Amino acid sequence: MRPGRPSIYDTKLAAKEMLDNPRMHSRSLAMHGGCLQSTALRLLRKIELVPKKPSIIPHVLSKADKKRRVAVCLNLLKRHRRGNLFYRIITCDIIWCFYDNPDQSMQWVKRFEKSNPVQRKDIHGKKSMLTVFWCVDGPILWKLVPQGKSVDADYVYQELKEMVFNAEKSCGKGDKILLLWNIRRLHFAKETQEKLEELQSENPPQPAYSSDPAPSDYHLFRSLEHWLEGKQLRSEDDLKLELSVLFE
C-alpha cells in the first residue's frame, strides 16, 4: 500500500484541460482544480508537460502562396534531376562588418558567481559594407564597398562581371549561372535584369516569403561573426586582412 495521503486531483482532467488550451497558465489550472499552484505544477510535471515558447512565423501563407511554393519546388527538383543544379548556384549578399567586435561568448564561472559584463556592440560605430559571392566550393569574389559609395545597379553590374570572370576561371565555362541573392530592390530593377541576361545569368525561381534567398545569414555570415568576435580592428586594411585569412 502506498504511504501518505492519496491524491484527490484528477491528473487525466488536468491533462485534458492543458491539451485543450495549451496557453493556460498554471495559476488558472490551479483555480479550475481547486488546488495550490505548486500542486498544479507537480501535476504538469507528472504528465510530462513542459512550457515551451512557440516559434514565430514571419508570414501566414495563403492557399495561393502554398500552391506557388509547391510549383516552384517541383520546378527546382526537375532542374536538379537534369544536371548539376547546386554547382551552378552562386549566392550574393551584403553585410556590415564592424571594426569593434566585443567578445560576447559564454563564460565558465562557479555556480553562484556572475559572469563578467561585456559591452554591447555599437551599431553606430565604425563599419564597412562587405559584398560577397560564394558557391558550394567557397567564396568566388568579395569586396568592401568604398566609404560613401551606394550599392546601386551599376555597382552590382561591375561586380557581376568580375564574378562571372572569376567563376569561369575557376570552374570553367559551362551552363548558365543561377544567381541567388538577397540585395533588396536590386534583383527587381529592370536594368539589373537586363544586365544579368547580358552576362548569361538568371535568377532561379523563389517561393514567396521564403528564407531560401538568404542562406548567407545562417551559413557564411555566422562563421564571419564568430571569426571577428573579440577583435578590435583599427583600419580597413586590418579588416581586409582578417577577411582574406577567413575566405582564402
Image (cartoon, rainbow, N blue to C red):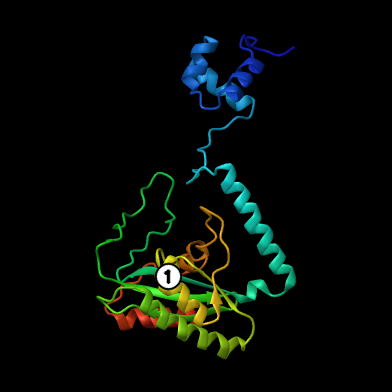
Residue 201, image quadrant: bottom right
Residue 190, how many percent across, how many down?
42, 70
Question: Please, what secondary structure does the residue beneath circle 1 have?
Answer: helix
Count of residue discs? 1
Q: Nearer the viewer, residue 33 or 127?
A: 127
User: Residue 218 appears at what percent x and percent y?
Assistant: 51, 61
| The N terminus, quarter of image | top right
Q: Is residue 221 left or right of residue 138?
A: left
**In x, y percent, where is residue 17?**
59, 19
**Residue in front for this viewpoint, 39 or 61:** 61
- The residue depicted at 36 percent of the width and 52 percent of the height is 115
Residue 106 is drawn in which quadrant?
bottom left
Residue drawn at x 25%, y 70% is 126
The answer to whether residue 153 is above or below residue 110 is below
Most extreme residue toward the bottom, as rendered? Answer: 169
Residue 244, position as x, y percentages in the image = 43, 82
Q: Which residue is mark 1?
A: 190
The amino acid at mark 1 is: Lys
The answer to whether 106 is drawn above or below residue 12 in the figure is: below
Residue 17 higher or lower than 157, as above or below:
above
**Residue 232 versus residue 95: which sits nearer the camera?**
95
User: Which residue occupies 51% across, 82% down?
Assistant: 199
